[in-house]
Amino acid sequence: MGIVIAIPNDGSLASEIGKKGSQNGITYYDRKMGGEDIVALLPSDVAGKFYALGEAVSLADVVVISTANIDSLFGESVIAAYLLEKKVIFTDENDISGILKSIALKEYLFCNRKMIIEKIISACAEKKADAGELRIDLDKAFPVKGIGTVLLGFVRSGKVKVHDTLQLNGGKEILVRSIQVHDSDTQEAKIGDRVGLAIKGADHNEIEKGDILSSKGMPKTDSFTSDIYMSPLCKEVDIENAGYTLVSGFSVVNCRITREKDLFQIKLERPTALLESDRFVLIREKSPRILASGKILKRQ
């Protein structure tokens, strides 16, 4: 079983937690500790690709937020974790008790940087290794000579085995030829693992960041009904008929919003791999950029 953490605002802390690996909007840091595989997600370029903060936080089991610098990125990281209802571990460099009085985080604690790994493992102790139907969110596809198409992504639920036949966005059937976790061959991967899959059934240029492999496929959608929860910093904003960027896992897409009684209709710019019960954040261009969150209630 793997543990996925987001470190949205401190590259040096990510380096302390794991070894730097691949980069695709997010830089990955890997660490093996006993029976635990930890992957830390650090947004690579918040100034140019702010949506990566939403990606990292929405994928994480735990969000680790550094208090070394109390700046706008710190505040946006806290709001993203709050809106997505994530467990949060704060480092203890600075006292932020006054800030937290205005943001009702559900579950958080403070920790010295030297003890951060132990706290991460403890916070994820109840995570179930085989929970739910298989779902793999993909962030990269590329060809490898002599192997064929290779996919990178996270097992979000369930487990995948060599020779499994899966569906890509509810369409093409994909055969899993081999699996790697932390660059080591394995016969199966479980929830939280960052996997490399050698597959048969699709070419790398048919697969986009944000696509989903599952045992029970679901086609992409371009609209859905949702609830909306506003950031405590943006409560007075009228979100209807304005454009935003929706971020959920590796899916990043522009959208427009209209109200339907107590719920909202979200119209996406293009069909996107999103499933019912997925949570998302809405981002806008001006500050504060983290505007709201929601959960997909019914796909159209």
Image: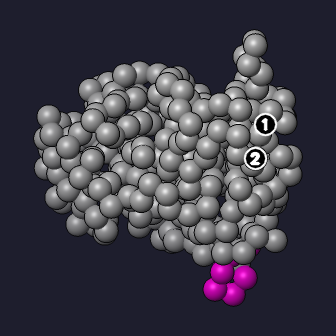
Give, as a single range, the part of the protein colored magenta.
260-265
Residue 80 locus on image (x, y percent): 44, 55
Its colouring scheme is: one colour
Which label's residue is closer to the chain start, 2 or 1? 2
- Seen as rendered, the residue at the extreme top is 145
SS at badge 1: loop
**How would you classify the magenta stretch by its main secondary structure?**
strand
Residue 263 locus on image (x, y percent): 66, 81
Front one among 240 and 173: 173
Quick check: 28 above or below 153? above
Q: Is residue 255 visible?
A: no
Q: Nearer the viewer, mark 2 or mark 1?
A: 2
Quick check: 198 above or below 219? above
Which residue occupies 60% across, 32% down? 179
Circle 2 residue: 165
Q: In the figure, is residue 85 to the left or right of 242?
A: left
Distance of label 2 from label 1 (alpha carbons) = 16 Å
Residue 142 locus on image (x, y percent): 73, 23
Q: Which mark is residue 207?
A: 1
Which residue occupies 77% across, 39% down? 175
Amino acid tagged 1: Ile
Asked if the magenta segment contains residue 4, the reply would be: no
Which residue occupies 28% across, 64% down? 107
